[in-house]
């Protein structure tokens, strides 16, 4: 939307008069007029046209009216994407609104429809800022605000970010939102804490406390009522029961029942005493009867027993005699066998000793014979041994070291070789005598034979008779015979060590050693023959024989005879022993039999003695038996009589236990009734007191009252709960919506704001957060400065820039909106204003900006389309 | 010829703690005043006896003051005779009460504590069926079938309890045979318990309470003046208004376009009657936010003139239209919040309670925005 003309009639100071601003164009339009020249009036009229219903009587509308009264009228021509329209509104006394299509002059809407048309122009989609953006002198936004609010805003909007935020909220309707949220929170805070707990001493908490108190009270009273009802029921029961208990007839019947039962019981008791006495008597008679019977029976039994025992005794004595005879017989046989065995044993012993002695004598004789032979062998062996020792010693001296002969042989050959070589190399001399020569030449006194060649070693002195001594010198080298000499020395050493003269002797010695070794072998063989187990063993054997044969016992007899005798004796002994073994069990059996019989005998005697003592003297026995029998029968009769008496009594006896039980029951019925009566009276008195007290307190009324009060309080608490829920729900809806709006606009607007800021503040650079686009800090002359506190000028500049940014954004969305400024730059210095103008022009390329100002001088530099006010008369 | 006043359910001593404190005293006082009104009705109709068919007292333990003042009031109207029957609220189980009444009753007060004939006059016998306990669980009037009365005597039975499956306390354990009058040859069966006046048949009547104590019946307090010309003749029953206060619940069904304030004004009585009126407006249907506000304001405005006036609008739905939201804001974050709340208030995915909270929150937003704007 763009505005192309504004006309007013009868508005404020233009009472009864019309003025117009025609020819408003795209880009920057400036209406610069001195104060009170209609600048603010035009601005307010324009605002009323777009934002006040023609039916409104709000303060803003009433303020349009001149002092003289009448209906203010405002008219604007606008251009939208759909065409050109004329909007006209008349307020107050002649309410009217209309929209005319300027293309054809047709009226297209009136009254409410016209209002709808206008509001659709300024209203974006939901949550968008209005289609006109306003900045007014000194303040941001157009709405009326009180001083406190203004102060508040200053305090809040001190930083760049909060300032821009505030602007965005102002444009998107956020301030009413804040007021409502505040109102909502205020109401909520009266009820609950920040954490939504009931606030102490708040009405909600008070209601809850009251409810809790009433719950307890109601419970207490209900308990009381229940107790009272219980008491009433109990009392009714008690009264009923007492009526029964205290009935005179009932009491009399209880009494007579007791009396009757007592009489029955007493009779039964007397009968029981009589029975007891009779029973005691009968018991006594019975015991006497028993005694008599016992005595009688005992006598008879003893008598019978006595006879039996006598017979038995006779038998036993006969048996005893037999047993004694038997035992003696057996003992005799036994003794005989024993003595036979003893004799046989002695005989055998003797024969064996003799046999042993004969054996010993035989052995001694054999040993003596062997000893002679062995001694002879020992002598021979010892002789052989001596010669063997001697030979061995001889051999030890003769034996040459191993390899000596070979070594000597080798040296001999070498020496012969060396000597031959020497002979060959020695100078030789040979005397050739003249056949006439008489004088010989001697060497070392020895005459040289003629023609005999002789060699010499180093020097030879030829004594030539008569002629002197011819000394011949060979002049052989000094060591010419060294090798030979060394070998010879070696041979000499070897020979000396073995005490040998030469090799031949060595060979002879070797031969004699071999002969002696053979002799030695011979000796050894013989020795072995004589003493195969060694000489020591032989000596031992000799010693043994010497010992054996030392004493030969002097015993005569044939060993075989003796041996037979011994065997016979042994057989006899065995036989005797067999007989003894046979006899032994027989004797012990006989002993046992005898012992058994003796025991029986003793027993019979003892019993007989006892029985006889019972029976007493033999002659008095018959009379005694008669008297015992008589006594028995008498006692028996006595007892039977008494017993019959008891039985009769027993048959007639009443049931005492039953009588007693009946009496007890009758008494207990009476007692219980009396006791119950007493208890019931006590209980009744208690209940009466309790019931009277409670009734006088009117507990049930109090209970019903508490119940009703509780119901009311419960409702009240529920209402508070709901109230809290509603307020919380509302607050959260508002807060969410507000933060959504902030998110929706803040960032895009700041994005748009950024180039504008840089344009305006070329000496200042803003640092923006890359992600959120929010300004972070401000840098001036290379210094970071706090952006916490902004100057008034900067704030109003920001206010304008924010709207320009919004306008850009709206234009980008295809809904261009005019920006209208009413002396919006009062705090800014001229320098800054010029920069602001640049920003406006830059922005106005695709934007309508209408500037109202009274600062003519400063705004002359703004440029743009200058608007002039002209007179106007509305059509009739 | 027998003339008497039939009443019941006086509930003397009821404290009305569920009512605002200011009117409790008046309500209690009105209960006591009814004794005088019954006596006046008796005198007006030439009756010499007043039958109270149970629940004379609200509880089994009325305070001594209530008891004594009641007896004193009754005594003051001698020679009028009062016959009091134990009801379920003041049954014979409350022996303390009945013992005390026996001890204190003046000569013109007869306590019908036993099912035994009481001679009203030479030609009329009263057959009372006192409540033995709070819930007797059997028909206490059964004995009347075989109760012998002198020949050609008028037979009147006095009983307390329900006759069908209804009962004032919703407890129908001791049902009185509805044809008891016919079965027992009664000329009149005077019943108590039901707080509304009701004729079961020409000879069987509930008098209803002479002074209402709840919103249930929407009827004025009444007693019955009964005239029986002779034994076997049909009784002539005349209702007599005795109530001081009028209790009622008025339904108010609204359509979206209705003006709730105007409609509710039609329901409200005019003038001084308001002071004696306890009224509940039970709103249902649909209305716009401003309609709701104006309804509440109307009630709020009228309430001080009434003994009690309350609006129950839990069943009243609120219709919101774009225009209503415009009143909050035409655009912007406020409008968005309002629309969100409106959506939630009809969102069936949410619980009924959540929807209602959203609806209330929207109405609250509406009222805040009105206040902030003005």
Image (cartoon, rainbow, N blue to C red):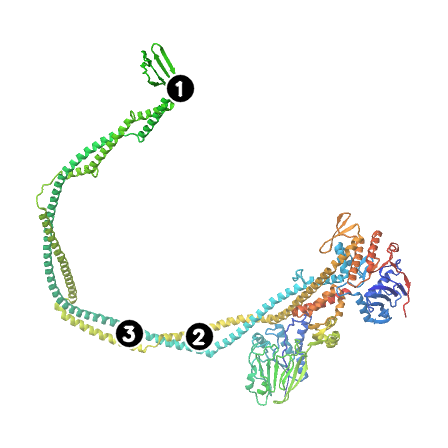
Residue beneath label 2, please?
Answer: A670
Q: Which mark is residue A476?
A: 1
Q: How many marks?
A: 3
Precedes in sequence: disc 3 or disc 2: 3
Element type where label 3 sits in the image: helix
A617 left or right of A715? left
Residue placed most toward the observer, B318 or A760 = A760
Quick one: quadrant of the C terminus of chain A? bottom right
The quadrant holding residue B57 is bottom right
B263 left or right of B124? right
Q: Residue furthest front?
A: A435
Number of residues whose C-alpha sits closer than 10 Å to that of mark 3, classed few (under 14), some (14–19) or many (20 or more) = some
Q: Are marks 3 and 2 on the same chain?
A: yes
Element type where label 1 sits in the image: loop
Residue A3: image location, x then y, percent: 84, 64
Element type where label 2 sits in the image: helix
Number of residues whose C-alpha sits closer than 10 Å to that of mark 1, classed few (under 14), some (14–19) or many (20 or more) = some
Give the chain letter at badge 3.
A
In the rendered view, tell whether residue A556 sits above or below residue A69: above
Precedes in sequence: disc 3 or disc 1: 3
Quick one: quadrant of the N terminus of chain A? bottom right
Q: CA distance from mark 1 to mark 2?
A: 184 Å
Give the chain letter at badge 2.
A
Residue beneath label 3, please?
Answer: A278
**Residue at the (29%, 29%) spot, across then down:** A400
Residue A71: image location, x then y, percent: 87, 68
- Confirm whether residue B34 shows in the render: yes
Q: Nearer the viewer, mark 1 or mark 2?
A: 1
Number of residues whose C-alpha sits closer than 10 Å to that of mark 2, classed few (under 14), some (14–19) or many (20 or more) = many
Q: Are marks 1 and 2 on the same chain?
A: yes
């Amino acid at each position: 939307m763009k505005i192309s003309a504004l006309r007013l009639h009868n508005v404020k100071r233009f009472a009864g008069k019309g003025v117009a601003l025609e020819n408003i164009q795209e880009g920057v339009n400036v209406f610069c007029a001195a104060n009170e020249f209609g600048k603010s009036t035009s601005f307010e009229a324009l605002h009323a046209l777009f934002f006040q219903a023609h039916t409104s009587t709000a303060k803003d509308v009433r303020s349009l009216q001149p002092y003289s009264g009448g209906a203010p009228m405002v008219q604007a021509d606008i251009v939208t994407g759909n065409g050109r329209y004329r909007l006209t509104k008349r307020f107050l006394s002649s309410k009217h609104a209309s929209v005319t299509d300027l293309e054809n002059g047709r009226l297209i809407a009136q009254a409410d429809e016209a209002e709808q048309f206008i509001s659709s122009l300024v209203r974006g989609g939901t949550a968008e800022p209005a289609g006109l953006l306003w900045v007014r002198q000194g303040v941001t936004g157009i709405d009326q605000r009180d001083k406190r609010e203004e102060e508040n805003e200053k305090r809040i909007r001190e930083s760049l970010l909060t300032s821009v935020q505030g602007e965005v909220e102002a444009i998107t309707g956020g301030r009413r939102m804040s007021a409502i949220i505040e109102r909502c929170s205020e109401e909520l805070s009266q009820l609950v804490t920040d954490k939504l707990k009931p606030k102490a001493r708040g009405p909600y908490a008070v209601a809850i406390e009251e409810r809790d108190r009433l719950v307890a009270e109601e419970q207490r009273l209900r308990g009381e009522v229940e107790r009272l009802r219980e008491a009433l029921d109990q009392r009714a029961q008690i009264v009923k029961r007492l009526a029964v208990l205290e009935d005179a007839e009932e009491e009399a019947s209880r009494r007579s029942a007791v009396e009757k039962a007592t009489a029955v019981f007493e009779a039964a008791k007397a009968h029981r005493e009589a029975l007891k006495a009779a029973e005691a008597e009968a018991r006594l008679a019975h015991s006497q009867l028993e005694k008599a019977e016992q005595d009688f029976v005992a006598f008879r039994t003893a008598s019978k027993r006595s006879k039996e025992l006598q017979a038995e005794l006779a038998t036993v004595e006969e048996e005893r005699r037999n047993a004694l005879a038997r035992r003696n017989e057996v003992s005799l046989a036994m003794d005989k066998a024993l003595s036979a065995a003893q004799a046989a044993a002695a005989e055998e012993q003797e024969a064996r000793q003799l046999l042993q002695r004969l054996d010993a004598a035989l052995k001694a004789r054999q040993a003596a014979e062997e000893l002679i032979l062995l001694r002879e062998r020992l002598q021979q062996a010892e002789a052989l041994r001596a010669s063997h020792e001697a030979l061995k010693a001889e051999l030890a001296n003769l034996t040459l070291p191993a390899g000596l002969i070979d070594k000597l042989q080798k040296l001999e050959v070498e020496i012969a070789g060396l000597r031959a070589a020497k002979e060959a190399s020695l100078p030789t001399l040979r005397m050739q005598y003249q056949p006439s020569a008489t004088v010989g030449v001697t060497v070392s006194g020895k005459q040289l034979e003629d023609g005999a060649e002789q060699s010499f070693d180093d020097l030879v002195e030829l004594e030539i008779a008569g002629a002197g001594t011819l000394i011949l010198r060979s002049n052989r080298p000094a060591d010419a015979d060294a090798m030979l000499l060394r070998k010879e020395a070696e041979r000499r050493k070897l020979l000396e060590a073995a005490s040998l003269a030469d090799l031949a002797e060595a060979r002879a010695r070797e031969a004699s050693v071999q002969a002696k070794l053979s002799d030695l072998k011979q000796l050894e063989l013989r020795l072995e023959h004589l003493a195969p187990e060694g000489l020591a063993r032989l000596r031992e054997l000799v010693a043994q024989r010497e010992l054996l044969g030392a004493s030969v016992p002097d015993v005569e007899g044939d060993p075989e005879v003796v041996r037979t005798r011994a065997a016979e004796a042994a057989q006899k002994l065995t036989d005797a022993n067999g007989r003894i073994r046979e006899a032994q069990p027989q004797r012990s059996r006989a002993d046992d039999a005898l012992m058994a019989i003796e025991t029986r005998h003793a027993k019979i005697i003892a019993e007989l003695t006892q029985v006889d003592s019972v029976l007493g003297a033999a002659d008095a026995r018959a009379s005694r038996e008669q008297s015992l029998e008589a006594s028995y029968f008498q006692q028996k009769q006595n007892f039977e009589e008494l017993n019959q008496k008891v039985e009769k009594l027993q048959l007639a006896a009443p049931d005492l236990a039953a009588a007693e039980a009946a009496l007890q029951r009758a008494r207990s019925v009476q007692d219980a009734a009396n006791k119950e009566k007493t208890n019931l009276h006590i209980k009744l008195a208690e209940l009466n007191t309790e019931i009277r007290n409670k009734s006088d307190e009117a507990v049930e009324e109090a209970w019903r009252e508490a119940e009703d009060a509780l119901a009311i309080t419960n409702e009240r608490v529920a209402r508070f709960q709901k109230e809290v829920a509603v307020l919380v729900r509302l607050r959260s809806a508002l807060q969410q919506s507000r933060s959504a709006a902030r998110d929706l606009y803040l960032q895009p607007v700041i994005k748009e704001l950024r180039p504008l800021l840089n344009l305006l503040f070329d000496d200042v650079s803003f640092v923006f957060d890359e992600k959120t686009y929010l300004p972070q800090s401000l840098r001036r002359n290379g210094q970071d400065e706090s952006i916490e506190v902004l100057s008034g000028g900067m704030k109003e500049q920001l206010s304008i820039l924010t709207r320009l940014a919004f306008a850009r954004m709206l234009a980008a969305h295809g809904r261009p909106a005019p920006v209208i400024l009413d002396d919006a730059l009062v705090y800014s210095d001229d320098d800054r204003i010029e920069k602001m103008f640049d920003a406006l022009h830059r922005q106005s390329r695709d934007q309508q900006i209408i500037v109202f100002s009274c600062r003519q001088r400063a705004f002359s530099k703004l440029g743009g389309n200058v608007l002039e006010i002209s007179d106007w008369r509305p059509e009739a | 010829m027998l003339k008497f006043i039939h009443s019941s359910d006086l509930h003397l001593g009821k404290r009305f703690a569920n009512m605002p404190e200011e009117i409790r005293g008046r309500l209690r006082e009105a209960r006591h005043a009814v004794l005088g009104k019954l006596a006046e009705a008796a005198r007006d109709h030439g009756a010499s006896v007043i039958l109270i068919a149970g629940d004379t007292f609200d509880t089994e333990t009325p305070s001594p003051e209530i008891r004594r003042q009641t007896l004193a009031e009754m005594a003051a109207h001698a020679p009028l005779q009062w016959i009091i029957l134990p009801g379920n609220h003041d049954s014979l189980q409350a022996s303390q009460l009945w013992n005390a009444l026996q001890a204190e009753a003046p000569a013109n007060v007869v306590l019908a504590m036993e099912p035994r004939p009481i001679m009203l006059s030479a030609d009329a016998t009263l057959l009372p069926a006192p409540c033995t306990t709070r819930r007797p669980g059997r028909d206490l009037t059964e004995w009347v079938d075989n109760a012998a009365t002198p020949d050609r005597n008028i037979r009147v039975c006095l009983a307390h309890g329900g006759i069908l499956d209804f009962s004032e306390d919703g407890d129908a354990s001791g049902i009185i045979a509805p044809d008891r009058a016919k079965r027992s040859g009664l000329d009149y069966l005077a019943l108590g318990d039901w707080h509304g006046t009701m004729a079961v048949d020409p000879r069987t009547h509930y008098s209803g309470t002479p002074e209402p104590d709840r919103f249930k019946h929407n009827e004025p307090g009444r007693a019955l003046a009964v005239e029986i010309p002779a034994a076997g003749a049909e009784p002539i029953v005349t209702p007599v208004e005795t109530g001081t206060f009028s209790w009622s619940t008025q339904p108010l069904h609204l359509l979206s376009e209705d003006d709730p304030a105007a409609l509710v004004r039609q329901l409200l009585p005019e003038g001084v009657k308001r002071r004696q009126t306890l009224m509940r407006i039970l709103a249902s249907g649909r209305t716009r936010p401003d309609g709701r506000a104006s309804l509440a304001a109307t009630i709020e405005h009228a309430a001080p003139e009434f003994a009690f006036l309350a609006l129950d609008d839990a069943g009243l739905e609120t219709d919101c239209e774009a225009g209503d939201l415009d009143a909050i804001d035409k655009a912007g974050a406020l409008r968005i919040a309002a629309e969100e709340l409106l959506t939630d208030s009809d969102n069936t995915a949410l619980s009924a309670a959540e929807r209602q909270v959203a609806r209330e929150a929207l109405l609250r937003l509406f009222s805040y925005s009105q206040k902030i704007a003005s």
